[in-house]
Amino acid sequence: MSIFDQIKRFFTPERPLGKGMFQYRTPPNAPNRFRMHLRIDQDGTGVLVINAAKVLHLNQTAAEMAKLIIEEVPSEQAARQIARRYRVKREQARKDYDDLKDKIFLLGSTDEICPITYLDVQRIDPFQTPASAPYRMDFALTYACDNNCGHCYVGRPRDFPTMGVEEWKRVIDRCWEVGIPHICFTGGEATLYPGLRELIEYAEDVGLVTGLLTNGRRLANRAYLDGLLQAGLDHIQITLESHNPAVHDEMVCAQGAWAETVEGIKNSVAADVYLMTNTTLTDLNAPTIEETIDFIAGLGVRTVACNGLIFAGKGRDVGIGIPEHDLEPIMARVQGRAKAHDLRLIWYTPTRYCEFNPLEHDLGVKGCSAARYNMCVEPNGDVLPCQSYFQSMGNILRDPWPSIWDSALANHIRSRAWLPEQCRTCPDKELCGGGCPLYAAEGEYQCRDSQNTAG
Amino acid sequence: MNRKLFRLAVVGLLIGCLTLVGSAPTVWAQAYRFSLDRNISHVYVNSDGSADIEYILTFTCAQGAHPIDIVDIGLPNSTYDLKTAQAWFSPGLGEGRRYPLTDIFKSEEVAIGVEIHLKGYTIQPGKQGTLFFKIRVREMVYADSKDKAYASLEFAPHYYDKANVQGKTFLEINFHFPAGLTGEETRYHKEKYHSATVQDGRFVFTYVYPETNGYTRYLHGISFPRKYVTQVYKAPLLGGQFYAVLGKIGEFFATYGCFGLFFLFFFVLMPTINSVQSNRRKMKYLPPSLSVEGVGIKRGLTAVEAAILLETPLNKVLTMILFSVLKKRGVVVLEEKPLKLEKVDPLPQANWRDYELEFLASIKPDGTLDEKQLQRMMVELVKEVNAKLKGFSRKETIEYYKNIVERAWQQVQADATPELKSQHFDQALEWMMMDDKFQERTQKTFTTDTVYMPSWWAYYRPWRTHVAGSRIDGGTVSTGRSSSGGGRSVTLPTLPGAAFAGTIVSSIERTAGGIVGRLESFTGGVTQVTNPPPVSSSGGVRSSGGCACACACAGCACACAGGGR
């Protein structure tokens, strides 16, 4: 720095760190391996995402220290840097830096510690903290699919135009620039996209965590699966609708699909990749869901997920969905079975809490996270609020990010402006969020209170 | 000092050195160097608030030093009257003839003081001479800061720069009080006088430092009743010390010229500016904070589950389970020591919890409890509670249930009738059992009122139809122990409150004490499963992950087509 720059700097007030995205990966031989992504926003505050799953909100100081931690800056040097920029003694800065580093690494290396109770992490209400970008972006690489599910939520034709690999790479770059740490390749069927492996490799090189949502059929080819894993693929979700081949094939409308899907599951279990299955609960498979879970457990899968019918695409009219108020006994069976096999159970679907309260059933907070925590890029680069909400908010390659993130539709969904009047005064509104807006839009939505006929 | 400033300072230093060529030669001139052999001063307080100051100063000029041709003497303030100044010189210790000195001027060296020119009596190097000096300073007596009825005077004899004065000095300071004071009216400031005498009808405080130095300032003071002076003055804001400092600064610049200026700039001013400006440009520091989305309180736990959360001792938890099963009429206590139970067959219709069913399953044919099975049940219960807490704030939830326990007590204590008290106590018994102070609070709650035993008491003590001291006027209940054996009707007693409390407490304690063989080994068998020592996870990042317990993570709360971790 020239002397004039130094003099200029002397009179220039310090400013928060600028927007940026940083990642950290533990060394390959570390006993507890994890990945972290730090997104620093314009105001200097940050979001730290651990293993693409645990989200911590950081104030300005914590964000700046987290960046130094990610850059593996030694304590003394970090303290000097902080003391140069903030009105704090170096000793205090060093102590706070070391404490924060210990906390972050502990949270990265175990899920067993409640951060609020034991690590002095503050609790904030879900869905209330503004963000500048989602935590996950789904990449619908293509709408082509080798299944033909009767309840498919895709509301586009199968030959919908799709971008080439180089364009998708630019989308990956854009996601990194805006601070999205995690992408999931989906579709249609993402494994039908020829450049999938190349995109996984590229995304991992940029620094993103990559996942694959698939029907699993192509993963029956072990070599193909290995190729994806060698490219750096982090996790896989395979849809299995039933233990019963007939039920599964009937739901996906493809003979022989079950056998390939199960082979894909077996290969993934053997490959020791983070794997989960997903099952869409419908009238067809709900009666035997326990056997399905037994079967999945028998394959060696440790995490199972379920979701309700998505009211988009063919799902709108297929008529086999389970109404929200009928979910409780089915989920009780699902939970009982998952518990019996010591499986981790994830329930995906946001429902109205007055109909089915996931909190009361120990399924965690569930609320619509479209245009908030996750979004979707279509094959042509248009950005959707989520994989199932087929209204574009702009094109990720052509439109500036703020115009997409702050589009009218995004704000409409985030602000729950679509809620009916009765929901607006409900004390559970903030957590419940009114369930799925697609479910509401399809006329299935009636407030239970509005159905009272007392008097 | 930061690096850039240091570089600037070095540059300044070099420049400053170059200017020395043209600077005043005073730095290199012969310096004054002497010993101040004696410094004797007398301060005479006058009735008009002035003071006459007299000095006897004996100097020995150092060998090779500048001859002492001018003597500067600092004065307390600028109200000295130069016209009253008188000076004499006497060689040596001043015991011989005294020669008057007439060149007495305002000093050019000290900020407030006079300079006396020795002229023909200049003290040459190696020689000794004594200067006698007196002067009146008008505003010397001030209002005493501690006593309004008193007046004060403070004085420090003149001292010289350490660079000039060497050796030892005999220092004596004498304060002469106004005439007419009594001894009790005299006061000193801070340090007590070394001797007090009466001279010419005036009290005199004397301070003597036989072997001090000539460069240390010795400030002393006296106080006396205001009535002995006609005038007191306001103490000046800036005393002589301030001017002395200013004088030192002036001396510094006079001695070192431009170099001094650069020195001051780079080593004093620049660091100060740097420090102030640094602070101004830095951002406010807030300690780093992390926050995570979470839901708060996990409601809906049973008392037993809450007890696990509150880390209640496991024998008490087992006792709570036993009582919950008793209340559902699922078991009968056959014996207390050892504890023997009998399952009720068929099991009554009730909302049976898993842990209750597992508890029942642990009853062996002989009625004792299978501890291994109880341990397994407890492990599952702990895991279940932890799983239920995921996504919730453990801290807030613990407080919530502690509050429930407290409110249960408050309810029972507030109940007006014995019936209500018994009823609510019965309903909330498992919650209250969690309280560490259960025994004490039960005894406080039930003191004098008559209490109805709970209806399920018969299942707990079926062999007892009454308790000593009770009235048998309670209701009856059938134990319904087995379908083949036929029920036995038992009349439930009422008890005086204190007896009830004692019964409940002692019963629960006995049960808890005997429900497992050794509590430590039982607890250890549970915790080694629920809280095992940490083990390194194998596999890569791909096989780890998943949501933290207090995180409404993106992966889980995401679009219903799935996709999270």
Image (spheres, coloured by chain):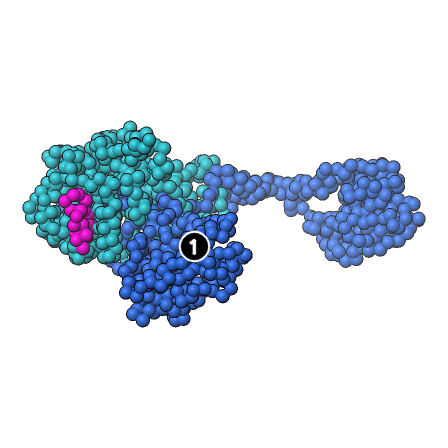
Using the rendered view, name the quadrant where residue A180 is placed. top left
Is B302 on the left or on the right of B108, as rendered?
left
- Closer to us: B427 or A111: B427
Residue B195 picture location, percent across and down: 84, 55
Amino acid tagged 1 = Asp
Residue B388 seen in the current view: yes
Residue B352 picture location, percent across and down: 31, 55
Task: Please give the range of residues in magenta.
Answer: A276-294
Residue B129 picture location, percent across and down: 82, 51
Q: Colour of chain B?
A: blue
Is A259 on the left or on the right of A121, as rendered?
left
Label 1 is found on which chain of the structure? B
**Chain rendered cyan:** A
| B203 within the magenta span | no
Q: Residues within 10 Å of mark 1 (few under 14, many from 20)?
A: some
Q: Residue furthest top?
A: A408
Q: Residue at x 46, y 43 (%)?
A: B286
| A287 within the magenta span | yes
Q: Residue at x 67, y 46 (%)?
A: B29
Q: Which residue is mark 1?
A: B426
- Closer to us: B156 or A168: A168
Q: Residue furthest right?
A: B201
- Closer to us: B399 or A367: B399
Q: Residue at x 47, y 63 (%)?
A: B503
